[in-house]
Amino acid sequence: MITAIASIGAIAALAAMFGLLLGYSAIRFHVEGDPVADQVEVMLPQSQCGQCGYPGCRPYAEAVASGEAEISLCLPGGEGAMLAMAELLGREPAKMGEIAEKPKCVAVIDEQTCIGCTKCLQACPVDAIVGAAKQLHGILRSECTGCELCRAPCPVNSIRMEPIPETLATWKWPFPTYQRLPLPAAARIEHAPSVSAPVELEQREAA
């Protein structure tokens, strides 16, 4: 009985010691994150496609927050994400160019033609493809972001993109899209600062 109590006490002491050590380490080596980068990352589609030139949405968000990258590089996010980032960061909206609107899709592998080369598996940025060498590969539909990066490496063209039916479970509220038009000349003159205002103020102070 005494041995069991001693063993429990020793384990409790070790647990408390390790808990204190982990708590001290968390405080001592805590790294502050960038709150602006966190907000920018939320605005991105999280496709991890790399079309912006960065390895993922988080590195691109950090580059945008620090001013190293333009806000118009995220093609999957489109104009909506660009305008949201412009409003958050106080930047001027940038030109996105011609972006073809595409429905959200997932990749599908043809079971008859897949040779199990694993090239698509290596190209997937979110690990949505499962399989082994010389074995049939499969797509995890819940993880696939539709970035299409797996199609080009496939030597037998066995991957196609299948649109996702829009249901209550898959529909998301889109970002607002609008175009900023220049003010007409009359409005610019009306909102222009008056030159006579400082003179009138000086005259009142002198009186």
Image (cartoon, rainbow, N blue to C red):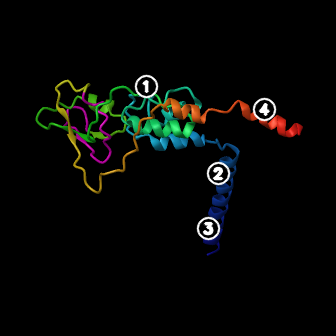
Number of residue marks: 4
Please state which of residues 92 and 19 is positioned toward the viewer in this rendering.
92
The amino acid type of the residue labelled 4 equals Val
- Mark 3 or 1, closer to the camera: 1
Structural distance between the alpha carbons of marks 4 and 1 = 54 Å
Pointer 4 or 2: first along the chain:
2
Structural distance between the alpha carbons of marks 3 and 1 = 55 Å
Pointer 4 or 3: first along the chain:
3
Structural distance between the alpha carbons of marks 2 and 3 = 21 Å
Classify residue 98 as left or right of residue 161: right
Asked if the residues shown at circle 3 and circle 1 are in contact, with their CB atoms under 8 angstroms apart, the answer is no
Pointer 4 or 1: first along the chain:
1
- Residue 207 highlighted magenta (yes or no): no
Q: Which residue is mark 3?
A: 8
Q: Which segment did they paint magenta? A: 131-151
Q: Quick one: which residue is furthest to the bottom in this view?
A: 1
Query: Is 103 located above or below residue 169 in the figure?
Result: above
- Mark 4 or 3, closer to the camera: 4
| Picture quadrant of residue 151 | top left
Structural distance between the alpha carbons of marks 1 and 2 = 37 Å
- Residue 64 image point, x, y percent: 53, 32
The amino acid type of the residue labelled 2 equals Leu
* Quadrant housing the N terminus: bottom right
Asked if the residues shown at circle 1 and circle 2 are in contact, with their CB atoms under 8 angstroms apart, the answer is no
Q: Which residue is mark 1?
A: 53
Please state which of residues 150 and 34 is positioned toward the viewer in this rendering.
34
Q: Which residue is mark 4?
A: 199
- Mark 4 or 1, closer to the camera: 4
